[in-house]
Image (tube, helix red, strand yellow):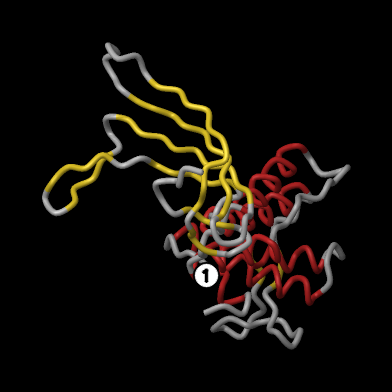
Amino acid sequence: MEELKERVYCSRCKGKTKHLIITSYKEQSDVDADFHWHDHYHIVQCAGCDNKSFVRQYGDEDTWEYINGYREWKDIFTVYPEEPKVETDEERWKRKFEMLYFMPPKQFQFVPENLNKLYKQTINAYNSQQNILCAAGLRTIIEGICNELNIKKGHIYNKDGSKKLNEKNKVIFTDNLAGRIFGLYENGYIIFTHALLLQKIKNIGNKAVHDIVELDLRQYSGHK
């Protein structure tokens, strides 16, 4: 049997080996064509283990490279099953992230359409690792919920549950987003622990919106 002109990957030997051609089907451009090419399809057999594979051998006027200063035409050999790709560290982390942290959107029956769209877009941003857009979306969702529930003000609390005082030793009652989040708590929509969590999300969103700072999710997933 004729030997294939290039070593190709053998899925049984787990490496590139010599292959013998069992049979071939060949196509090529006409002799007087403006652009010349050839396309060969081979069923091959590994010379070492006899494993069978399929190989496409393609070449045209543009498939060449310089070797020792001279242009040499080289065919492109593609084998099936293909050789497994070696993952880079970044590709490996991305694959693990997608497997572990992919978040399908939930369905909310009684949420207004505008908030539902914003929520789905934020989830899409998260799954696409568009972290700045995701953080900004989370902050906007919080503000949208406050608007929907007509929460306009609230006190500011310390982590121990006591109300925070200003320079004049008076409790702080404000209409900014921090106050409105605690307003959700004061009106019984969320518990105090959830209010503290939303404050952290609000701070992340503020950094994304105002300072264009991206949250590195690897800090929260055990990766450096």
Decide if residue 33 is on the left or right side of residue 176: left
What is the x, y in percent for residue 158? 68, 83
Q: Nearer the viewer, residue 85 or 213?
A: 85
Amino acid type, callout 1: Asp
Q: Nearer the viewer, residue 116 or 129?
A: 129
Q: Is residue 136 above or below residue 54?
A: below
What is the x, y in percent for residue 147? 71, 49
**Helix, strand or loop at disc 1?**
loop
- The residue located at (45%, 65%) in the rendering is 213
What is the x, y in percent for residue 20? 51, 48
Q: Is residue 38 above or below residue 209?
A: above
Quarter location, residue 193:
bottom right
- The residue located at (82%, 44%) in the rendering is 111
**Residue at numbered disc 1:** 216
Residue at the limit of the structure toward the front, as seen here: 1
Counting labels gives 1
